[in-house]
Image: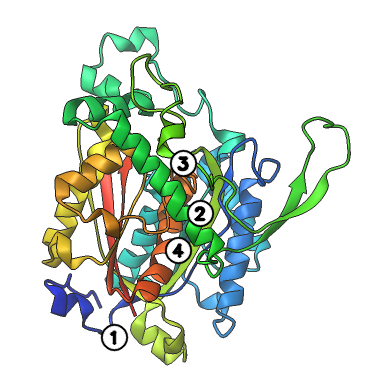
C-alpha cells in the first residue's frame, strides 16, 4: 500500500507500518584514484565487499527475501550491469534476487536508494538494497566524459545543449563568478572540510559505517613484482594538517585566473556503498524492528542551467522541503556534496543553512567523490551523525552534471 508524503515535523517524525526503514547503511573506505588503496582493485570487488557486509550486518534476514538490488553507477563498463551482477552473486545473494543499475550522474547512489524506496512505497517491493559503486581509477577520463561535440553535430546544437558537456570545473568557475563566491572563501571552506574529516577519522566516527576491504596493491616503481595483499580500513584522501593559507598557494585548475583548484574541488575517488531498506511492517513481521537505524522520508530532483550545474542543491532542496512541509531550520544535519567549494558554499548561502550543520564530519573535498557511490556514502555518514548529535532529521543533497540537483530526507529511528 502506498503511503502519503508527510507534511510538517509532527507527520515526518510519526511512525507508520508503511514507513520505508533502513536497517543498515555501509560503505567501503573512499580512496584516491590512481594513488590510493583501491588503485589496483576492481569496481565489482568493492561492491561485493559492501554487499557481503550488508548481509553480515543483517544475519536474521534470509537473502532470498530481498526483492531487488539497485546500484548507482556512472562510468562502469556496460553501465555497471555486468560488474554489479557479478558483485551481487559473489557476495552470496541467491540467483533469484534481481539486479539493476541506475545512472543520474553524481546523484546515482541517492537515486538508487530512492528507486528502492519508491518500489516499497508503491507496494512492488518489500525488501531492497540500494547503493552505488565507482572505480574512477579504471573508468574516468576523456572517453567517458567528452568535452567537445563531434564537428558535424556542433552547429546543430543549441549552446544550452552543448553546455551539457562543459567541463565540471568550468561550471564551478561560472558559479563563483556569477554569485560572488571568492577564492578566499572557497579555500577556507575546503580546509575546514579536511579539518572536520580529520577530527572525525581520528575520533573513530567513521568506523561503524566503513567495511574494511582486503585487496591487492602493485608497486608502481616495480610493476612486474608480485602484488601485495593489503587491507584498506580508512579513507585516504584526508589531509590532516592542511590550512586555508596552504590551499591559497595552489594554482587554478580549470582557467588561468579562476578560483577552483585541486584543493577546493572534490577528489577523484574509488569506493562503494549500500543500504538495506524494507517496509516497517515487514521488519516487524521478520523480527527485525530492533535493527532499524532510520527511515527514508522523501526525495526531490530539479533541473537548472547546465553551465551552472553546481547550483543543483539550491533548487532541489526547496522542492523537497515543500513536499514534506518543512523549513530549512527544521533539518538537524545536512550532507551536501562538495563537488566544488564554490557550489556548496553558494547553495548553503542561498538557502540560509547554518554552516555548522553542513557536513559535520567533512565532505567530498576531504573524503572524496566516487561518483555513483557518493549519495549512498553520504547516507552512511548521515545516520550515525544523527544518532551522535541527537538530531532527528537529515538531508542528503548534491548537484548533478548536465544541470540538476537531488535531495533526499531521512529520519533517525
Badge 2 or badge 1: first in the primary sequence: 1
Disc 3 crowd, CA 10 A, few/some/many (<14, 14-19, 20+): many
Observer-nearest residue: 167 or 51?
167
Which circle, 2 or 1, is nearer the viewer?
2
Discs 3, 1 touching: Cβ within 8 Å? no
Which residue, as the protein is rendered here, is positioned at the far right?
Answer: 225
Name the residue at 22% across, 44% down.
347
What's the distance in space between the residues labelled 3 and 1, CA to CA? Answer: 34 Å
Q: Of tags 4 and 3, which is closer to the observer?
A: 4
**Residue under numbered circle 3:** 74
Q: Which mark is residue 17?
A: 1
Residue 143 point in image, percent of width and height:
52, 24
Q: Is residue 252 left or right of residue 30?
A: left
Which residue corresponds to mark 4?
380
Decide if residue 53 is on the left or right side of residue 345. Answer: right
Labelled disc at residue 374: none
Looking at the image, residue 72 lies above or below residue 127: above
Q: Earlier in the sequence, mark 3 or mark 1?
A: 1
Distance from Cα at disc 2 to Cα at disc 1:
39 Å
Camera-near label (4 vs 2) is 2
Closer to the chain start, of discs 2 and 3, is 3
Direction from residue 265 to residue 272 in the image, left or right: right
Amino acid at each position: 500500500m502506498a503511503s502519503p508524503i508527510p507534511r510538517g515535523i509532527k507527520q515526518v517524525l510519526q511512525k507508520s507500518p508503511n514507513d520505508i526503514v533502513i536497517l543498515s547503511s555501509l560503505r567501503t573506505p573512499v580512496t584516491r584514484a590512481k594513488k590510493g588503496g583501491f588503485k589496483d582493485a576492481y569496481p565489482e570487488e568493492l561492491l561485493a565487499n559492501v554487499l557481503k557486509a550488508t548481509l553480515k550486518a543483517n544475519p536474521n534476514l534470509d537473502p532470498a527475501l530481498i526483492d531487488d538490488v539497485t546500484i548507482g553507477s556512472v562510468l562502469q563498463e556496460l553501465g555497471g550491469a555486468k560488474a554489479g551482477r557479478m558483485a551481487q552473486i559473489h557476495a552470496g545473494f541467491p540467483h533469484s534476487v534481481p539486479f539493476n543499475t541506475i545512472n543520474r550522474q553524481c546523484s546515482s547512489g541517492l537515486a538508487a536508494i530512492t528507486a528502492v524506496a519508491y518500489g516499497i512505497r508503491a507496494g512492488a517491493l518489500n525488501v531492497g538494497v540500494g547503493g552505488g559503486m565507482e572505480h574512477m581509477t579504471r573508468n574516468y577520463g576523456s572517453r567517458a566524459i567528452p568535452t567537445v561535440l563531434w564537428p558535424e553535430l556542433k552547429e546543430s546544437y543549441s549552446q544550452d545543449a552543448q553546455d551539457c558537456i562543459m567541463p565540471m570545473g568550468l561550471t564551478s568557475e561560472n558559479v563563483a563568478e556569477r554569485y560572488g563566491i571568492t577564492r578566499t572563501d572557497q579555500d577556507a571552506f575546503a580546509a575546514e572540510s579536511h579539518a572536520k574529516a580529520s577530527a572525525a577519522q581520528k575520533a573513530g566516527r567513521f568506523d561503524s559505517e566503513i567495511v574494511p576491504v582486503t585487496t591487492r596493491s602493485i608497486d608502481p616503481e616495480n610493476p612486474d613484482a608480485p602484488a601485495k595483499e593489503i587491507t584498506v580500513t580508512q579513507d585516504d584522501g584526508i589531509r590532516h594538517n592542511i590550512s586555508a593559507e596552504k590551499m591559497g598557494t595552489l594554482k587554478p585548475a580549470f582557467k588561468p585566473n579562476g578560483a577552483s583548484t585541486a584543493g577546493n574541488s572534490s577528489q577523484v575517488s574509488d569506493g562503494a556503498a549500500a543500504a538495506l531498506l524494507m517496509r516497517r511492517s515487514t521488519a516487524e513481521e521478520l523480527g527485525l524492528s530492533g535493527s532499524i537505524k532510520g527511515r527514508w522520508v522523501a526525495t526531490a530532483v530539479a533541473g537548472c542551467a547546465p553551465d551552472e550545474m553546481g547550483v543543483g542543491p539550491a533548487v532541489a532542496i526547496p522542492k523537497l522541503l515543500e513536499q514534506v512541509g518543512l523549513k530549512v531550520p527544521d533539518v538537524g544535519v545536512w550532507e551536501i556534496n562538495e563537488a566544488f567549494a564554490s557550489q556548496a558554499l553558494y547553495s548553503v548561502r542561498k538557502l540560509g543553512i547554518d554552516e555548522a550543520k553542513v557536513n559535520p564530519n567533512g565532505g567530498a573535498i576531504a573524503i572524496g567523490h566516487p561518483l555513483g557511490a557518493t549519495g549512498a556514502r553520504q547516507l552512511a555518514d548521515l545516520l550515525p551523525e544523527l544518532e551522535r548529535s541527537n538530531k532527528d532529521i537529515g538531508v542528503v543533497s548534491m548537484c548533478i552534471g548536465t544541470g540538476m540537483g537531488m535531495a533526499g530526507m531521512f529520519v533517525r529511528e
